[in-house]
Amino acid sequence: MAISNHLREFYGLPAFDFPAADTKAELPDPASVAWRISVGSYESEEEWEAAFTRFAESVDTTEVRALIVGSWSDVYDSGPDEVISALVAARDRLPALRALFLGDITFMECEISWINQGLVTPLLDAFPELRAFGVRGGQELRFPAVRHERLRSLTIETGGLDAEVVRSVAASDFPELEHLDLWLGTSWYGANAQVADLAPILAGSRLPRLRSLALRNSEMQDEIAVALAGAPVVAGLETLDLSMGTLGDEGAEALLGGQPLSHLKKLDLHHNYLGEAMRKRLLDTLGAAGVEIDLSESTEPDRESDGVEHRYTAVAE
């Protein structure tokens, strides 16, 4: 699976594409949409910063609640350093900003594992009132441990997430965080984290308000499931998401044999490698207890002639 569509909504607001320089269009109320600002990903006639300047001249930015950064120029070759600098410089002009997504880029513009990123935490420092922050792309992504008093949702989407980023997120202080979504990816595209790197998250004490945890798109999905079977963080969750990865019967068996999960509102296991018998057990136990379970996209592992299994994450390149 590739990311083929841009975000349709963000922070509960419909996404709206700020028009290109040569396009005239009626603009919506500044607070009513999540504004997406994009330029051509290759040989663009306009730099992202210039498009943002046009945006700031056309829209009352003091009322803007959500921003989506789409593609910047030459995204295959360069990171968003200048994009980030432009946003940081404009922080006083965006007092109502509560949600920011960096890198809403589809595979037609740049494959997820080829998106260049960089040091993104200056955005969290510049906007202390942010409630939601997301970033797509793991190449050169840097996310040193940070404290943010207001953030409630953090999403990092990659085809391969570096262990240092995982450890830094785990070491960050987010006292109000309710939703954490990490796409861990595969070693082929740079993923090198171990379950031990997730320990501060799994312990639960660093994220006292966490209600939704997604550790997904991972080639170590079974190991994560085993760790979660006894992890203190689970008791406070309403939603647990282990989807898009290589989850098999071993991981599901650990979940069923570990601490009770019947308090969950939803368990998302879509894109999995579970056998029919295991899927039935999950439905007969957790499903019967009122947990909404997503078991869609169940797939048999590919097998070589020698019987070796191959499982794949949903999003890689």
Image (cartoon, rainbow, N blue to C red):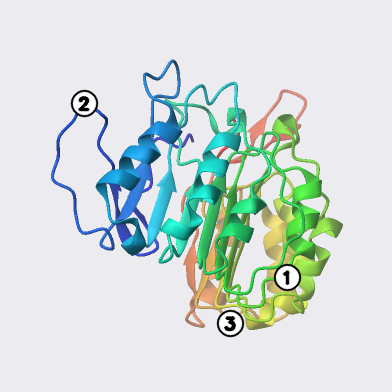
Residue 57, how many percent across, how many down?
30, 45
Q: Residue 160 versus residue 12: which sits nearer the camera?
A: 12
Q: Indicate the secondary structure of the residue bearing disc 2.
A: loop
In the rendered structure, the answer to whether residue 260 lies left or right of residue 162 reads left
Q: In the rendering, at what x and y percent does residue 313 appear? A: 61, 40
C-alpha distance separating marks 3 and 1: 29 Å
Residue at position x 72%, y 44% in the image: 142
* Relative to 134, 125 lies left or right: right
Badge 2 amino acid: Asp
Give the residue at x 13% y 45%: 26
Residue 193 versus residue 154: which sits nearer the camera?
154
Residue under label 2, please give it: 22
> How would you rate the neighbour count of disc 2 (Cα within 10 Å): few for under 14, some for 14-19, many for 20 or more?
few
Residue at 47%, 81% in the rendered image:
290
Q: Amino acid at mark 3?
A: Ser
Judged by depth in the image, the label closer to the viewer, 3 or 1, is 1
Q: Which mark is residue 262?
A: 3
Q: Earlier in the sequence, mark 3 or mark 2?
A: 2
Looking at numbered disc 1 in the image, what kind of residue is underneath it?
Answer: Asp
Quadrant in which the C terminus appears: top right
